[in-house]
Amino acid sequence: MQRWRSSLWLSLTVSALIAVCSGADTDITLDAKATLNHRIQSLDLLVFVFLLALTVLTIWLFKHHRVSWLHETGLAVIYGLIVGAIIRYAGTNTTLVHMQVETQGTPTYSDKLPPDTLWFKYPVNQTNTTKQPEDVKTYAYVFRGQVYDIDENEIDLKATFDPEVFFNIILPPIIFYAGYSLKKKYFFRNLGAILTFAIVGTTLSAFLIGGLMYGCVKLMPKYLSSSYTFLDTLYFGALISPTDPLTILAIFNDLHVDVNLYALVLGESVLNDAVAIVLSGAIQNYGEHYSNSGEFESTAFLRSLSDFVSIFFLSLLIGAVMGCFTALLTKFTRVRDFPLLESALFVLMSYSTFLLAEATELTGVVAVLFCGICQAHYTYNNLSEDSRQRTKQIFELLNFLAENFIFSYIGVSMFTFPKHHFDAGFIITAFICAALGRAVNVYPLSWLLNIKRKPKISSNFQHMLFFAGLRGAMSFALAIRNTVSDARQTMLTATSLIVIFTVIIQGGAANFLLNWLKIPVGVDDETEQLNNYHVHSSDGYLQDVEGGGGGGGGGAVGVSGRGKTRLVTGADSNLDTPLDGNAATATSGRRRNSHEKAILARIWGNFDTKYMKPLLTHSRPTLLETLPVCCNPIARLLTTTQQLTQDGSEFRRVDSDSDICIDNDTGNGISQDGLVGGGRRNSINRVSIRYMGDTQNLLASYRNLE
Amino acid sequence: MQRWRSSLWLSLTVSALIAVCSGADTDITLDAKATLNHRIQSLDLLVFVFLLALTVLTIWLFKHHRVSWLHETGLAVIYGLIVGAIIRYAGTNTTLVHMQVETQGTPTYSDKLPPDTLWFKYPVNQTNTTKQPEDVKTYAYVFRGQVYDIDENEIDLKATFDPEVFFNIILPPIIFYAGYSLKKKYFFRNLGAILTFAIVGTTLSAFLIGGLMYGCVKLMPKYLSSSYTFLDTLYFGALISPTDPLTILAIFNDLHVDVNLYALVLGESVLNDAVAIVLSGAIQNYGEHYSNSGEFESTAFLRSLSDFVSIFFLSLLIGAVMGCFTALLTKFTRVRDFPLLESALFVLMSYSTFLLAEATELTGVVAVLFCGICQAHYTYNNLSEDSRQRTKQIFELLNFLAENFIFSYIGVSMFTFPKHHFDAGFIITAFICAALGRAVNVYPLSWLLNIKRKPKISSNFQHMLFFAGLRGAMSFALAIRNTVSDARQTMLTATSLIVIFTVIIQGGAANFLLNWLKIPVGVDDETEQLNNYHVHSSDGYLQDVEGGGGGGGGGAVGVSGRGKTRLVTGADSNLDTPLDGNAATATSGRRRNSHEKAILARIWGNFDTKYMKPLLTHSRPTLLETLPVCCNPIARLLTTTQQLTQDGSEFRRVDSDSDICIDNDTGNGISQDGLVGGGRRNSINRVSIRYMGDTQNLLASYRNLE
């Protein structure tokens, strides 16, 4: 519970303190101690920063030499383990000094709550009394938390951070970036499957793991079984269920794995993080607030359920609303003339989404995810080219640093975090249950989905989905958040080990498995695009702007681009990928294309194209065309002149289809960028396409309205 | 001293607490309180984020309508003041509950230091005893600091941050960016004057202000005069002396003011921040550690002086070494193939400079400044185009957000920070002394400099320098760092008001003053360049690579580019600036060019071109040419093949002269970028120049060595 860093793990600092202590008075000693604390905090951070720098250099070396059996996250974990061990066994220690106190005189204070601060009168034995006349000084102490185990053998916290740091600083950029870089086309095409896996699958897996673990734990020796309630194991189930996108997607990205598999893995792992955090919150609430006995109570269960649903959807709503609000801001102001201001606005609005959700007791991480999705889908289209690149690059970098930090920290904390509790039985059970939970998530649901799904999820894909269930940042962050009881500490240890194992072993083996399962690699969505639409020349490629207004209803959210303007991502390097080699995939892609839009995706896509995009971006058709005639005054208000008069170069920038707006990468863009060297520097390197459509007609009709 | 946020300034949160309090047990209440605290912290931050977003939008509006009498920093301050007033007068309050405690039983604890944590046994009146069998709980309290004024009427902290946040989070990116974007050419040309103003001037000004204030304060009513020591007023002198570059440079930038004036103001204000922070630290140390009486003691003075000098130069050294180390890393690895990794490495190394300096009890801000300068001078040349842009854009954005945050906070804290102490007499004296201090900094030193300086600093320039002495972030951060005594609180208030006044009034009037003083505006350094060197065509412009090796010694650090390869910043918009209109400036520029290199700059420049640049970057001449023959084996080791074989496109990227590497802007790049619209998107938009020099010869000689 003590987060006040007091580990003096460098002897030089200790000696500095001693030097100051002798013969100086309390003030100076205190001052020296404060300085020392600051230095130690800086050192702690420095260790991690150097660790990250080292990781970066090694990643480069690995990429340079095309080492494929270890990926960056695995590397970060391994370095973290090494450094953690060094810190643990090489450093010197001083322990925290603590003292028992009670209230002065009789406790007249009648509030239920303990006071916020204690003012502690402490007699100082002074050698020098010129400056402080009294012998007693008063020090302020700030409330920190309850002490559960007074007799516990306190180990120092070395190089550890407040777990809340993860939720407030590390996870938001990772999750935002995941949302901001979702490949929306394939995401929406597989929406049904993704939602099933993420929501149903994660919940199912959480309950299964919770139940299994509870059963197993009850078979274990007395002291263990007594410390676990069903809620504890259920919480464990919830935190171990979400899968991590980072490593596996970095690999997929390198290999240009089949786009649908990619979309499934990415979409699921992004969404199940959101589901897991809300689910674990609901379970926590159930235990702490609703239930008195810890046993099943139907009202408490229902309240937790409603918590889960309402928090999830309200967070989603806040995220979406803030995203759309940013889109409106960027659409109706010309802030894009000043790219720096625009980028700043973008970052501020995205961050405020997180804060707003947290301030209203919702889940900031979930809000930020959906904010990211909306920003990519709408706002991105309104941004200037400079801001597009800048925001993408900034969040890419933040994401990279944050994820490597968290994986390094997982490694380091295995040795330095004092609240680990190793229990071989529990850990082995946890490993087995986690695998079972993943299996229950993948296989039965795939079978269920395959009943109606057109391109079945093949059994090889299912194996890969099962295998892609690495555990990562979210599991660890949830586990380390609460380490009050023995049970929770055992869970943290098990979670850390599962994360480390899956990231290093499964991550490393993914490459071989892909080969073994004969999953198509080297597939490029752009290649598929090119084949589908026979776009060969860059300029002068014409396609009508949604034919005649809102009719047809074809264009689901970028599902296909039929009846919608397409901009083709230029990706110069991709044009070189052998088209013939992928003929089979491409053909199947073409066939799929017409059949497989999920109904949900189709309805939403239609609504999106007709109302949302015209409202929030400069895209065509405008609301003037899609809204009923009676709404024309409003529609005119919400349609910018730019939207009507756009053409040529202006147009090119404005109406880029967001389906492909972030074509570069997800997870980790380095590899892709890197492998092709400097050739693909600006990832948004479009083959430019011009409209020569009915701009003039539209403009005329607009003038008529005036 | 209490930083624990406990301000419940939204009634909704208060009612939420009350609702939970009634009828629930202590645990839940505590939990609710923790949640509440988190929500309030989120709200605090949210207020600032919204404030920033609002500022961004208004800045856009002002720029859009070309409002020039109020600049962004002024705007941020004004919005801050408004929001601060609203928070102060609209919110509801609850106060912190605190309780006096003493040690349990007899105080057997004999250490001089108070304990790190208190474990407080607190009797909880429980209504529900099923879960907690005991009646007494133990809570942990963490040491915070000494309570100086036990009777003080505690006001709540509303929307305030720990002052250390400024030094550890807000200032570093601002200062780093200042270093990273220094226009080195003009900076080095005016090095002598800049160093004189920054080091001598700031110290002089600090002592003058300190002395004057002390005299004035002693003439004031009893209660005031007694609370000030000379050290207090000297500290005030040190903190109010540094000038702030932001506002004034944004204006200069918009107007393309004379480059030498620009360099003087920028260089001085960047360096005097560094001087001031070290100086104030030395003064603080003098008072706390070295001196017993608070009166003058020569040994204590000398120790402080050596502190000042050693901390300043060691910090400088750390910054420079880390910068050069990054340059070596980027030169000798091919991490540039992976721009994301490269940018990450760059950011990590820069941040670790700060941490390293802090961990070794030096001044991180100073280290980061010189690290920034080295990164721009060396590392920048080794980066890939992508990373150049990305790092520049990221730090530009960080700088923008940080500086607007700090100015908003200055506004808000005027109302919300509880430790303000208004004293009209002190404030008026402070205003007068600050102006006098600035005058002493500018006029006598300019006179002194003009004795030897070739292009004199004209009296109009001197007036402008005087007037450009806005106070800003550093003054405020230093003032708010220590608000223990009444004297210090009065200083904070005076400093805040001086900052607000100078930023709004002087910042707003700068435009008019420039006109009135007839200072040349619309001058462009590129224009000057073009005239000087008659570069008219873009491609195929040839100039020899430092003639025949290290001879000549002409090329001071980018002072002129004679005998050195020049890359001309393309800046398409600048090519349009009327060349004739600036003929006078250009001519004088040409004349100056040959005469006015400071000796210091010349020596350094020579060394830099011959040894540092060849060692740290891929530039030519190589060390093979500049080092004596006996060192050839080492020189070969330190020369990359790329350095020898570079040509064509490779070369263009590698050997960009860092003099002009960051041509875009300092302070605030928006304006420039903005005004020319999208036309000047990538600021590094060079007119490409090819070498057709003696690459082959060099390569041949390299082969001979083998």
Image (spheres, coloured by chain):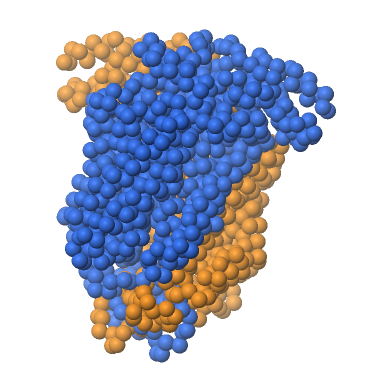
Chain colours: A orange, B blue
Report the residue at 21% width, 22% height from top: A636
Would you say B626 lies left or right of B595 here? right
Report the residue at 48% width, 68% height from top: A33
Report the residue at 55% width, 50% height from top: B314
Front residue (pair B459, B321): B459
Report the residue at 47% width, 71% height from top: A29
Q: Residue furthest front?
A: B451
Residue B323: % across, % down = 57, 41
Q: Is residue B169 above or below residue B177?
A: below
Residue A611 visible from this viewpoint: no
Would you say A556 lies left or right of B430 here? right
Q: Residue furthest bottom?
A: B106
Question: Quadrant location of residue B165?
Answer: bottom left
Q: Is residue B355 above or below residue B173?
A: below
Question: Quadrant location of residue A28?
Answer: bottom left
Residue A48: % across, % down = 56, 53
Image quarter of the C terminus of chain A: top left
Q: Is residue A171 above or below residue B33?
A: above
Question: Quadrant location of residue B122?
Answer: bottom left
Residue A367: % across, % down = 37, 46
Front residue (pair B235, A59): B235
Front residue (pair B454, B264): B454
Residue B467 visible from this viewpoint: yes
